[in-house]
Amino acid sequence: MTAVLGKDLLGLETLTSEQIGLVLDTAVPFKAVSLRPIKKVPTLRGKTIVNLFYEASTRTRISFEFAEKRLSADTVNVGSKGSSVEKGENLVDTARNLEAMNIDMVVIRHPSSGAAQFLADRIRSNVVNAGDGRHEHPTQGLLDLLTIRDRLGTLEGKRVCIVGDILHSRVARSNVWGLIKMGAEVAVCGPRSLMPRGIEGLGVTVLPRIEEAIEWADVLNILRLQLERMQAGYLPSLGEYARVFGLSEERLARAPRELLILHPGPMNRGVEIDSRVADGPHSVILDQVTNGVAVRMAVLYLLAGGRPELAEAAQAAKRGEAE
Amino acid sequence: MKPVLLTGGHVVDPSQGIDGRADVLVRDGKIVAVGPNIAVSDETEVFAADGFVVAPGFVDVHVHLREPGKEDAETIATGALAAAAGGFTSVCAMPNTDPVTDNQAAVGFILKQAREANAARVYPIGAVTVGQRGERLAEIGKMVAAGAVAVSDDGRPVLSSHLMRTALEYAQTFGVPVADHCEDPALAQGGVMHEGLTSTRLGLRGIPAAAEDIMVARDILLAELTGGHVHLCHMSTRGSVELIRRGKERGVRVTAEATPHHFTLTDEACAGYDTHAKMNPPLREAADVRAILEGLADGTIDAVATDHAPHHYEAKEREFDDAPFGVVGLETALGLGITELVDAGHMSLATLVERMSTRPAQIFHLEAGTLRVGAPADIVVFDAGAEWTVDPTAFRSKSRNTPFVGRKLKGRVVRTMVGGEVIFGT
C-alpha cells in the first residue's frame, strides 16, 4: 500500500485534515515510548536517515535525532559546516551522493523556501521538511496542534492567534494551514511591517494590536523575534517591540478567559514574551518540546510505510477511557 | 542572386497599411514591388505563399545573447539563428555581457560575430555607464558611431537620478534612446518573485509592483525634464501602464515594451518553485496581465520584446532563491502573440505585426519593419493557423529555459529572409 502521508512531508498546506489527524493520533502512543525506562522501539530498525541541516538548529535537529534513535533507525548528521556543501557542492549533487549510499530518508533544514520540495522531486528517498526558508516547518506545526489538542481536547472552533514576525516565519505558515484544516479559527497579530502581503488570502484575520489578540483568543502562539529585523529596517528597537507587542503578565491578566501560551523557541525573554509568562501556569512551551519528539516519531513511522493501526489503537483507548 | 517572388500570400505591412492578398518581389536584397499578380521573367524563383502571412521580419529590441562571457548558454550565432527561427530579422543585444559592452571595440566585436553568423541582424546596445556600474557615462558617441543603436544598463536600473538625467540629455546628440530596467533595488530587497498572495504562500521574498512603478515614474519625469527619449524595458505592472499612458498624453518621449511571458502568465506559475517562472521583473497578477494586454492593444506599450535570457540548464536546476532570473523567448514569441493576443481577441494580426516589427524598428530607428519598395528584404512568412507544441529540445537556442514547455500554440514560421536571403526555413 502507499504510505498514508505519501512519499514526503513537505508542508501542511498539502495535507488533508484526515492526514493531520492521523499524525496527531499516531503521536499519542509514541509519547509513551519516551516515558519508558528503555526509550526504544524496533520500528525503523535497519533504516538509514540523514539529517541534512543547512542552517543552524539545536532544538529541531536534536528532536529529530531523538525521534530517529528511539525508533532504532541509523542516523547520520550532515551540516553545511565542514562538509562538501562548504566546498560549493550544490544541493542536488549532495542529495544524489547520499542516495547512492542507499539511504531511506532525508530530514532537511534549509534557508531557501522550496528546498525540501526541490530535493523531494529529485530523489527516491522520503523527504521530511525540517524548515525551509520562510515557507513551512510542518513538524513544528504538528507539534503545536498536538499541544493545543492535548490541553483543549479539540482544535475545532478554538481561536488561535499567532503573534510576531509573520513575514519571515515558516512556523506561522505551517500553523495557519494546520489549524484551519483542523477547524480552528486563526488570527495573526504583529507590526504591519512584519505582516506578509495578502496574508488574509490564507483565511486568517489580522489583529493589529496584541490587546485585541488577548481579548479574542483561546491560544496565543508567540513567535521569536529575530534580532536582525532591526538592521533590515522593519522595526525601530527591541524595547519598542516589547512595549507594543510583548506578552507581559499585566496584559495577560486582562484576558477574559484562560489562555494557552505557546512559543516555538528559542525565546527572547523580555522581548516577545515576559519571563513570568513563559514560566507561568498558562505556558505549555515545554510540552511543545516533549510533543515534538513524539510527532516526529509519528511522521517518520508513517512515511516509512507504517500502518495507521497505532493511531486506531490510540483512538480506541481514548474511547475506552471516555466510557 | 536570383530575384524571388513570394506569390499569393496574405501581406501584412502596417507601415503602408497593407493587409491583403498580394505578391512581393525581391531583387538584390531589396523589396522591389508589392502588389497583385506581379509578372516576372522565367529566371525568377517563385515561392508559393498561399495560405501564409507575409510580413516585415520581426524586430526584437531586447535580447541577451550572452557572448562574450557566457557562451555555454548562448552565442551570437546561436542567438541569431534562434531569432531567425522565431521570425525575427533584427534583434538588439543588451550589453550586460562579460565584459560589458561599454566601448566601441566591444560594439565592433558583436557586429563581427553577427556578420559571421549570417542569420538575423544583430544590433548592439551599449552600456549607459562604464561597466554598468552606474558611476560615470560610457562613451556613448563612440559606441553609436561603431554601430550601437541604443544605450542601457539593463539587468539593473540607472540608479542615480542625476546620471539618468545626464544620459537622457547626452544621448540626444546621437539620436539613440536610453533604455532603462525599471526597478528600485532598495524596495525590491533581493526579492525573487512578485510580492503577493503567491509569494506569501510559497514563503519567497517578494518584489512589490511599486519597485517598478517608482522607476517608471522617475524616468518619465526625467524624460519630460530633458526632452530625451526614454525607452522602458519589460513593463510588468498595471501602474507602469497607467504612468506611460499619462506620460504619452502629455507628449513625453517615452516608449515601452512588454514580453510574451508578461502578457501570458501570472505569478501563480511560480507554484511548485518552478525556476523557469523566475524572471525579473517577475510575473505579476491577473490585473497586471490585463493592463499589459490593454496597453499593447491601444499602443501605450509600443512593442513586444522577448527579453530572451538564456541560461545553462544547471543554472536553473537550483533552489528558487539561487536560480538566475530569465527565460528564453525568441522561438515562442510569435506563437504566444497569435495565441494570446490575436486569437484571444485583444488585437488584429496587423496590430501584432506592428508591435513585433514596424513599431520597434521605428523607436530604435532601425532600417526594418517595412515592406516599402527600396527597403531591405527582411521578411517573415508564417502560417498563422499552424498548431504546434512547445518542445525546448527543438530550439535553435543553446538554452531551453522556457516556462512554456508542452504548451499548445498557434502560428509557426515557414521562412525568414534577411536582405533577400533565406536564413531560416524552406
Image (cartoon, coloured by chain):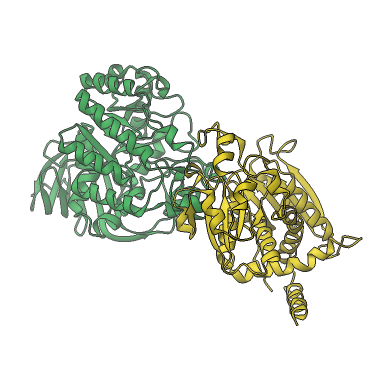
- Percent from the top left, x then y, of residue A257? 61, 61
Q: Is residue A12 left or right of residue B140?
A: right
- Percent from the top left, x then y, of residue A74? 83, 55
Q: Colour of chain A?
A: yellow
Residue for point 41% across, 24% down: B132
Quadrant position of the N terminus of chain B in the picture: top left
Residue for point 62% across, 67% down: A155
Against B121, residue A253 (above or below) is: below
Residue B210 in sight here: yes
Which of the 4 image quarters holds residue A161? bottom right
Which of the 4 image quarters holds residue A165? top right
Q: Is residue B334 left or right of residue A90?
A: left
Residue for point 61% across, 39% down: A226
Which of the 4 image quarters holds residue A120? bottom right
- Percent from the top left, x then y, of residue A4? 66, 70
Against B21, residue B398 (above or below) is: above
In the image, A241 versus A31, the foreground residue is A241
Q: Is residue B132 left or right of residue A173?
A: left
Chain letter, green in picture: B
Residue B46 in sight here: no
Q: How many marks are shown on the rendered structure?
A: 0
In the image, farthest residue toward the right: A37
- Percent from the top left, x then y, of residue A206? 48, 53
Q: Is residue B195 left or right of residue B340?
A: right
